[in-house]
C-alpha cells in the first residue's frame, strides 16, 4: 500500500508553501493566498515575500490547524500593488490526506 499524500489533516509540522506569481512584488501592499476547502468554504492565508521581492514569490508557513479538512484544496495567489493593480494567479491544487486517529 502506498500513501501519495505528504500532508495530513492537523499535521503539526507542515512544509512551507511557495507560490510563484510571475510578477515583481516590490510594491505589493497585499500578498495573500486564497484557499478553497473541500467543503467549498474559503479562507485567506497571509503570505510573506521572500528576501528578493523581484522574484515574485509568496511564501506561507502553515500551522497545525490551517489545513483542517481532508480532501482537495485549491490555492490562489492574490496580490494588490501600490498602483492599485489587483491580480490573482493560477489556481494550484493541494491534496490533504486523512489522519489515522
Image (cartoon, rainbow, N blue to C red):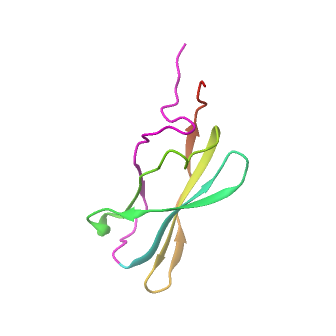
Residue at 46%, 39% in the rendered image: 12
**Closer-to-camera residue (40/54):** 40
Is 54 inside the magenta-drawn segment?
A: no
In the figure, 45 relative to 99: above or below? Answer: below
Q: Position of residue 50 (x, y in %)?
A: 31, 62
Q: Main secondary structure of the magenta part?
A: loop
**Closer-to-camera residue (6/85):** 6
Count the numbered circles shown. Answer: 0
Q: Is residue 27 left or right of residue 64?
A: left
Q: Position of residue 29 (x, y in %)?
A: 43, 78
Which residue extends farthest left? 51
Residue at 43%, 84% in the rendered image: 82
Q: Position of residue 75 (x, y in %)?
A: 56, 53
In the figure, 23 relative to 84: above or below? Answer: above
Which residue extends farthest top? 1
Q: Considering the image in quadrants, where does the C terminus appear?
A: top right
Residue 51 sits in which quadrant? bottom left
Is 14 inside the magenta-drawn segment?
A: yes
Residue 70 sits in which quadrant? top right
Residue stretch in magenta: 1-26
Residue at 66%, 49% in the rendered image: 37
Q: Considering the image in quadrants, where does the N terminus appear?
A: top right
Which residue extends farthest bottom? 83
Q: Position of residue 61 (x, y in %)?
A: 42, 52
Amino acid at each position: 500500500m502506498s500513501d501519495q499524500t505528504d500532508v495530513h489533516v492537523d499535521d503539526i509540522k507542515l512544509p512551507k508553501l511557495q507560490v510563484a506569481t510571475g510578477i515583481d512584488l516590490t510594491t505589493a501592499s497585499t500578498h495573500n493566498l486564497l484557499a478553497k476547502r473541500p467543503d467549498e468554504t474559503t479562507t485567506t492565508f497571509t503570505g510573506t515575500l521572500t528576501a528578493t521581492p523581484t522574484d515574485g514569490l509568496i511564501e506561507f508557513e502553515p500551522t497545525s490547524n490551517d489545513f483542517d479538512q481532508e480532501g482537495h484544496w485549491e490555492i490562489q495567489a492574490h496580490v494588490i500593488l501600490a498602483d492599485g493593480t489587483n491580480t490573482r494567479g493560477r489556481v494550484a491544487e493541494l491534496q490533504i490526506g486523512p489522519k489515522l486517529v
